[in-house]
Amino acid sequence: MAVPVVAAVVLLLVSWQVVVDGPLLGLDRSVRAAVRSSHRDHPSALLDHLGHLLSDLGNGALAVPVLLAAGGLAARWWRRAGAGRWWLPLPVAALTAVLIPLLVVPAKAAFARPGPLGDPLASGQWGWFPSGHTATATFSYGVAALLLARAAGARTARWLTAAAVVSALGVGVGLVWSSFHWLLDVVASWCLAALVLWALDRWLPRAGV
């Protein structure tokens, strides 16, 4: 139970601090200053390009097709494993793709947080909190790994989990390095996804069931 409790507490704390412009936002400003200093003192086109590439892993045009493809592949694996509800990964993947904007977009609009570049929000523009790219990556790759791991061997399941974690972390790092998001925008999306993934992991049956 530690995972959902910690994720929920951190998510609530960070959200509250964003609403009240609390002292925890100083962490965002410190990280932003450190990133700007690194860019200025140690310019690197390679690192900048890598940051953009990592950020793009959270683009829905990439992450959602991976999720849906994983759902189809998982259904095939579940069927081979003799699962009674072998088709279950397909609706789970599709519903996850729908769930991401349903959770993130209203939150962005409600918090209306300006981005790290300091530009005010334009009329009708969503805010930066929580990070949509981080949520898209963590949900998509996390659910894909969960669905596939249910019918995979222990070693493959570990590799799938590691790949999902590394992808989610990489997207967050890329977004902060590229000044696309504040650190706490990213942390909030990680926590939100962790809650959903934890619940899904408890609910999903094993492929042989």
Image (cartoon, grey):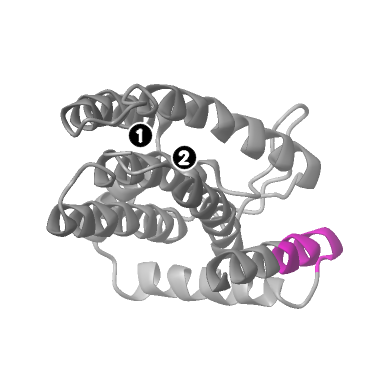
Q: Nearer the viewer, residue 3 or 103?
A: 3
Residue 79: x %, y % from top left: 22, 26
Question: Which of marks 2 and 1 precedes in the sequence?
Answer: 1
| Segment tinted magenta in the rendering | 12-21
Q: Residue at x 35, y 34 (%)?
A: 63
In this rendering, does residue 156 appear at all?
yes
Q: Nearer the viewer, residue 44 or 69?
A: 69
Crowd tier of the residue under label 1, counting other residues whose Cα lies within 10 Å: few below 14, some 14–19, many 20 or above: many
Tags 1 and 2 in contact by the CB under 8 Å rule?
yes
Q: Which residue is mark 2?
A: 136
Q: Residue at x 37, y 60 (%)?
A: 169
Q: Which residue is mark 1?
A: 63
Quarter holding the C terminus? top left
- Relative to residue 60, is residue 104 depicted above or below? below
The main secondary structure of the magenta stretch is helix
Alpha carbon separation for disc pair 1 and 2: 7 Å
The secondary element bearing badge 2 is classed as helix
Left or right, residue 169 beside residue 11: left
Disc 1 residue type?
Ala
The secondary element bearing badge 1 is classed as helix
Quarter holding the N terminus? bottom right
- Relative to residue 66, is residue 181 depicted above or below? below
Question: What is the number of callouts on the image?
Answer: 2
